[in-house]
Structure formats: C-alpha cells, structure tokens
Amino acid sequence: MKYIEPYLETLVTALAGLLVTALLAVIATIRGKIDGWLAARTTAAEQQILHLVAKEACALAERLFIEQGGPEKMKQAIAYAAEEFRRKGIAVSPAKLEAAIEAAWLDYRVKASTSAH
C-alpha cells in the first residue's frame, strides 16, 4: 500500500484537474450563450427605443419647425434624438438616427395621407 499511495495521489490530482478543466469549459460555454442572448435582447430593446425616439423627434420637428424646410427639420430631429440617446447613455450613429427618423417621417406621411381621405 505504501508504494501505491503516491500513484493514487497523482491519479486523484490529475482527475481533479480534469474535472476542474471540464467544469470551466462548461461555464465558458454557458457564459458565451448567455452573453449572446443578452446582446440580442439588448439590441432589440435598443431598436425599440430608437424607433420610439425617432417618432418623437419627427413629431417634434413637424410641429415646431413647420415653416422650415425638410433638411432643417431633419437637422432638428437628429439633434433632439441624439440628445435623448446621450441622456440615456445609448450610442447611436448619426446615419442610424437619420434612417430611423426618415422611417418615422414616412410613417407619419402615410398616416396623414390616409386620414385625409
């Protein structure tokens, strides 16, 4: 037994190391899946916020800058939306803001033309 004991210790230590390594691999895999899930949900939530703020910005520009032309209204709408996102701590590119506001404006025009008929 005296001669087998060092071999058993080595075997137990190696098995413990393998178990810990396997456990860390499983944790890393689960964490990756959770991170992906959270990123997808955050992106969806941010997309929803983007469209809501764009709709607000469009409505505000249409109401406050009625005498201004389209480019000035867009500039004011982008400024409003950018400030809202800055306050919320969300980074959105100017191109994405412009596209969302343009989409909101098109929705506004479609609703305005269908309600006029």
Image (cartoon, grey):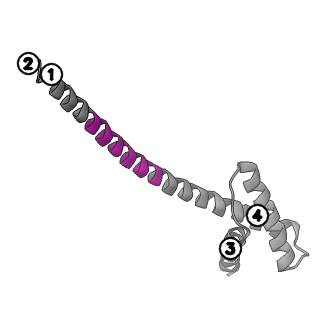
Q: Which residue is mark 3?
A: 99
* Apparent side of residue 37 relative to residue 108 in the rendered image (left or right): left
Q: Nearer the viewer, mark 1 or mark 4?
A: 1
Front in this rendered view, residue 43 or 106: 43
Q: In the rendered view, would you say 72 is above or below 57?
A: below
Residue at 71% of width from left, 72% of height from top? 95
Residue 18, by quadrant, is top left
Mark closest to the chain's N terminus, 4 or 2: 2
| Residue with the most extreme left position | 1
Q: Which residue is mark 4?
A: 57
Looking at the rendered structure, the kind of residue marked 2 is Met
Mark closest to the chain's N terminus, 2 or 3: 2
The crowding category of the residue bearing disc 2, from other C-alpha atoms within 10 Å (few below 14, some 14 to 19, many at least 20), is few
Q: Position of residue 4 (x, y in %)?
A: 11, 24
Marking on residue 5: 1
Dividing the image into 4 quarters, which one contains the C terminus? bottom right
- Measure the alpha-carbon separation of dots 4 and 2: 81 Å
Dividing the image into 4 quarters, which one contains the N terminus? top left
Q: Which residue is mark 2?
A: 1
Image: magenta residue range: 17-36
